[in-house]
Image (spheres, rainbow, N blue to C red):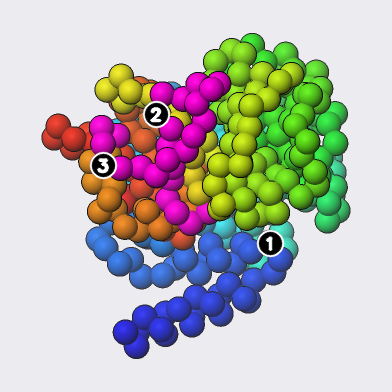
Amino acid sequence: MKFRYIFIFIALLLMLSCNESNIGIFYGLEHEEKLKDNSLPNGVTVGSMVKLVNNNKLYIAAGNVYTKTSQTEEDWVKIESPPGFDLSTSLATDGTDIYAIYYTKNSANKGFFSLNGSIWQEINISLIEGSIEFVKSVNNEILVSTRATVNDANLYSYSGGFNGVFTKINIPMIGSPFYAVYDGARYWVSNHNRLYRGNSLASLTPTAQPALGTDYEIRGLEVLDSSYIYYTYWEQDVEGHIGVTNGDSYNYKRDKSFMLNGLKLFTVSGYKFLLCGTGGRGYYQTLNPSTGNIDLEKPRNNVLAENYNSAVDLQDAAVLDFFIDGGDDGDLYALTATRGLWKNSLSGNSRTWSIE
């Protein structure tokens, strides 16, 4: 018990010593002693996860960048950081290459890199405005956001490769976090309380939005079909709402009295689940979601996971997002804040959660 309090005290010092970007937490967690004999530290925050099909590898940004072969039980292997940089929490792929943002420990310097084998090559970002903060991919296109001032930000597309071109996307940004999906015909991009759509990233226009004031923030997008998408948003960072829209009409409601993060549709054994992360209560789900069914319920031991009730650390986690490896009935991953990477896969005749 005494060791536990000492560890908590050290962790608090690490968090309080970092600057406003909170990157210091990744450094502290990255170097803590593992509680179990797993290849990943069980306390890391996993910021993003992608798969590169041409080499069948998975990649995660969790302080360091790690990789392993898809749908295997092999260990995660750390990719060495670029010289002079320490941390990465955001990566993406265009289907050909891996891109990552790296920070120094005090966040004083940031860089944008592409992976060449196991070596990071730095991409010139001197021509884009602001400090680069997030990189994501949508329909194999790379998007990066930069922070210009406390509230003002920019969104760029990147043409790929080592010597690619950045093109500014003409939408106003309040803060640098953003979400993006492609429904097979149109792009949907959200930032703060705004939602945009267009046939291309260059033709994004505002949707007929619900009455979202400045104290709202969209925190997840997922494709329902070619006409509708799901979305989650927060009100004053305490109340979670979920909705469905075609961009012109909305069905939405306050669903939970806590924060909701991310969304993912996953099909297992013919059952379709809409999964939604939370700010500290694991994930919630909707069975057979539709435009008229967006009720989130706490998971139970069922066809998706027969051991959820015993996966205590996952039940209490802040689940930031999900990743699917292998499509329907494939491996499902839950990306958490300070609770590691969790994997839902078939074990014998049952699907179970386990920590990586």
Q: CA distance from mark 2 to mark 3?
A: 13 Å
Residue 266's image quarter? top left
Marks 3,1: beta carbons within 8 A: no
Q: Residue at point 71% right, 66% down? A: 20
Q: Residue at point 41% right, 84% down? A: 5
Residue 115's image quarter? top right
Q: Position of residue 257 (x, y in %)?
A: 56, 52
Q: How many marks?
A: 3
| Residue annotated with mark 1 | 21
Q: Relative to residue 207, is residue 279 drawn left or right?
A: left
Q: Nearer the viewer, mark 2 or mark 1?
A: 2
Residue 287's disc number: 2
| Residue annotated with mark 3 | 301
Q: CA distance from mark 2 to mark 1?
A: 37 Å
Marks 2,3: beta carbons within 8 A: no
Magenta residues (range) = 279-304
Check the image and report above or below for 134 versus 246: below
